[in-house]
Image: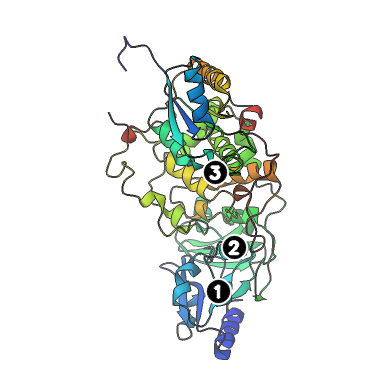
Amino acid sequence: MQRELMERIRALMDKGVADQVLAWKRGEFFYDTEPAILTKDELGEMVYDSFCGPNLSKYLIKEMPKIENKILALIKPCDSYSLNQLITEHRIDRDKVYVIGVGCKGKIDVDKIRAKGVSGITGVDENGDKITVHTLYGDTTLDRKDVLLGKCLFCKGKEHRIADETVGESEDTSEGSDRFEMVKKLEQMTPDERFSFWRKELSKCIRCNACRNVCPACSCVKCVFDNPNTGVQNKAAANEFEENLFHIIRAYHVAGRCTDCGECSRVCPQGIPLHLLNRKFISDINELYGTYQAGECAGQRHPLIDYTQEDSEPSIVHERGNNG
Amino acid sequence: MPMNQEWKPKIVAFCCNWCSYAGADLAGSSRLSYPADVKIIRIPCSCRLNPLFILRAFQRGADGVILCGCHPGDCHYSTGNYYARRRMTALFGMLSYLGIDSRRTRVEWVSAAEGAKFAETMNDFAKTIYALGENVKLEDLRCKEN
């Protein structure tokens, strides 16, 4: 797959379609992949394997002013939603991007391999449903579906919503899972249980801002949290739940635009299930204003910048019950 | 808080300039009483209410936040309150999801002619907040002045 993709990119570059490609390259370890802009000479550095989890669509924004010709972008099926959303918001100029839809059969989370007690990982071989992990202490075989990234368990399907051409086969790894299952479970708890759940989770936050920086929907030039006049800078937190405002607003600012790509939870070094905040908004919007999937196609108008005269009143939140 | 002082709730009421603020005025000039715990903040339109304002109010120790605006369809700017309605529904849903009692947040439509409704709404909201007691769930000591 990687060789096929590389040949195709080289052929496109030879034809003069573009002179750069937005792809992944190897990071420090074999399971680290990082987004990279590569020219034809650097193309040898490109990788495409089961560790290419990062969503590349956001990295196009910074390239936009620099591009004279076109840029090639490697987009997985789930990333194509984010790309559509960014085109809708005029952050990315569709005419400057040549989208290569790359096939995806679910990406592997190295932390999940480690959580199974495997250490000293030196390499991974894939063989259909099984993966063989090579370690310093011998080989281990694991089920592929047990070590998929959290977001791949709620796969949005194998179809690229936007692509000029596709390379490779995709597979739906969701297996019929309900992405709102955990949201519903939380909604059924009592308010105090919910509060202690979120307090426990959000207390882990170290405000590294990784969730904000990786989010394709969070792309403001000037972020409200970089405002030096908020009055909380340089003040030590007096209790451990003080990052709640950041997380509520982070989720709120992308409400209606969040494509549920799951990058926030993937990058969180503390393992906070941040996508559950976004999914609450998605589930509320679906319930109250009709099913909506951000990024399904370019040019959609999302429900929070729209209205009807018959909308329910905000008191519905209380009437729905279970509020203590 | 000193022990000898009776607990008083802090209630923030965001009122739109064109309807609810005038409604509050009418309540005053009609000699209708509503609790002094309600602090009114005038905003140009209900959709001016940035959700951060509500969160910041809670951070600084508010026990309840209420938004008042023109009745849907009567907005001075034609459509502001329709947008506010969707935004507040989303925000209140999230606060409730985080475990903040949904009775602490409210939206009420009060026109400039409804002084009685304004007083009644505020009395009822204050009663609810008194019954719920102090809200410490979202307090942030960094944001408080003392």
Residue depicted at 35% across the width and 50% down the height? A227
Amino acid under disc 2: Thr
Q: Toward which corner of the image does residue A72 lie, by quadrant?
A: bottom right
Helix, strand, or loop for circle 2? helix
Location of residue A193 by image quarter: top right
Callout 2 environment at 10 Å: few (<14), some (14 to 19), or many (20+)?
many
Q: Earlier in the sequence, mark 2 or mark 1?
A: 1
Residues under numbered marks 1 and 3 in contact, where contact means CB atoms less than 8 Å apart: no
Q: Tell me if B6 is positioned left or right of B110 in this view.
A: left
Residue position marked by numbered label 2 in the rendering = A88
Q: Which residue lies furthest to the front in this view?
A: B29
Chain under callout 3: A
- Kindly identify which residue carries mark 1: A73
Residue A238, can we see it? no
Above/below status of A246 relative to B63: below
- For the residue pair B37 and A270, the one nearer the viewer reads as B37
Measure the alpha-carbon separation of dots 2 and 3. Answer: 23 Å
Q: Which of marks 1 and 3 is nearer the N terminus?
A: 1
Query: Which residue shows up at 54% across the image and 32% down it?
Result: B19
The crowd level at tag 1 (other Cα within 10 Å; few <14, some 14-19, many 20+) is many
At 39% from the left and 37% from the top, the residue drawn is A242
- Label 2–label 3 contact, CB within 8 A: no
Tag shown at residue A277: 3
